[in-house]
Image: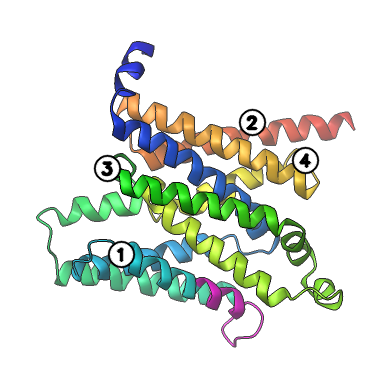
Amino acid sequence: MFTKLVEYLQFPFVRYALIVGVLIALCSSLLGVTLVLKRFSFIGDGLSHVAFGAMAIASVMNLSNDMLLVMPVTIICAVILLAAGRTAKVKGDAAIAMISVSALALGYLIMNIFSTSANLTGDVCSTLFGSTLILTLSQSEVILCIVVSLIVMTLFILFYNRIFAVTFDEDFARTSGTNAGVYNVIIAVIIATVIVLAMNLVGSLLISALVIFPALSAMRVFKSFLRVTICSAIVSVVCTFAGMLVSILCGTPVGSTIVAADIVVYACFVAAGRISSKRE
């Protein structure tokens, strides 16, 4: 098996997939903790469906780079969804459900009506579940993912204290002089960016697992925000790397294999958390 893995690593597209997968997993885990604590766990699912709808429109328009449409649309919807949780008549969870279902349905409808592919079912399955997308990245797409991932991690580190304050007590953060609205927009932009990148890894239907599972696993053992974030990042990277290796060696779908690894690790952390609580 080791020899087989070494042979696969000789191919550039396999190395590209591993590099991008690890970076996306790291970025996803950083925001997962914030989303769980702000009770916006399903925003990843909603935004992924929005990205799917935008991607369908981009494919119909024959755009050479669908990121030019998908990224701005997803960012705008992320800002709207976070704002809806506080001010709109349609509250956050209902707004997410409404936008999610609408974007998914309209995207699939557009792809059927204006289909330009001979294998529509295969394309839709790959986009929804991430079957092979991560293994078809070009060198320019890899460079784009690396640059965007570095920007996301830099923003999170620079604004870590503010994001921490807005996550735990937004009203207190406002009274202490923090412009919570600005940092909510920063969070929304980072979330949308990560979602668009992660679609190439696990597909639009499985993105929530990539964002949420590592955070929930870490919270079973650790209590502080910093420790949970660091543990979540480690868990996400390890599960993604292991899931991709298994997928490459065994020929299983990339996205589903990564999520399966996350589920196994989550079960281990639940057991570890119970053992730790009994000792205390």
The residue lying furthest to the right in this view is: 280
Residue most extreme to the left: 118
* Residue 266 makes an appearance in the image: no
Earlier in the chain: of badge 1 and badge 4, it is 1
Q: Earlier in the sequence, mark 4 or mark 2?
A: 4
Whether the magenta-drawn stretch holds residue 27 is answered as no
Residue 200 in picture, x, y percent from top left: 37, 49
Instruction: Report which residue position mark 2 lands on.
Output: 268
| Mark 3 secondary-structure assignment | helix
The mark lying in front, picked from 2 and 1, is 1
Name the spot of residue 79 as percent of width and height, x first. Answer: 55, 74
Q: Name the kind of residue labelled 1 in the image.
A: Met
User: Given this view, does label 1 or label 3 mark the residue nearer the observer?
Assistant: 3
Check disc 3 and give the amino acid type: Thr
**185 versus 9 height, above or below:** below
**Residue bearing the label numbered 1:** 55
Spatial separation of the CA atoms under disc 2 and disc 1: 36 Å
Number of other residues with Cα within 10 Å of mark 3, as a class: few under 14, some 14 to 19, many 20 or more = few
Question: Which mark, residue 222?
Answer: 4
The first of marks 3 and 2 along the sequence is 3
Q: In this view, does 38 lie above or below 135?
A: below
State how far apart marks 1 and 4 are (Cα). Answer: 38 Å
- Amino acid tagged 4: Phe
Element on which disc 2 rests:
helix
Can you tell which mark lies on residue 136?
3
Q: Give the range drawn in magenta.
A: 78-91
At numbered mark 4, what does the secondary structure look like: helix, strand or loop?
loop
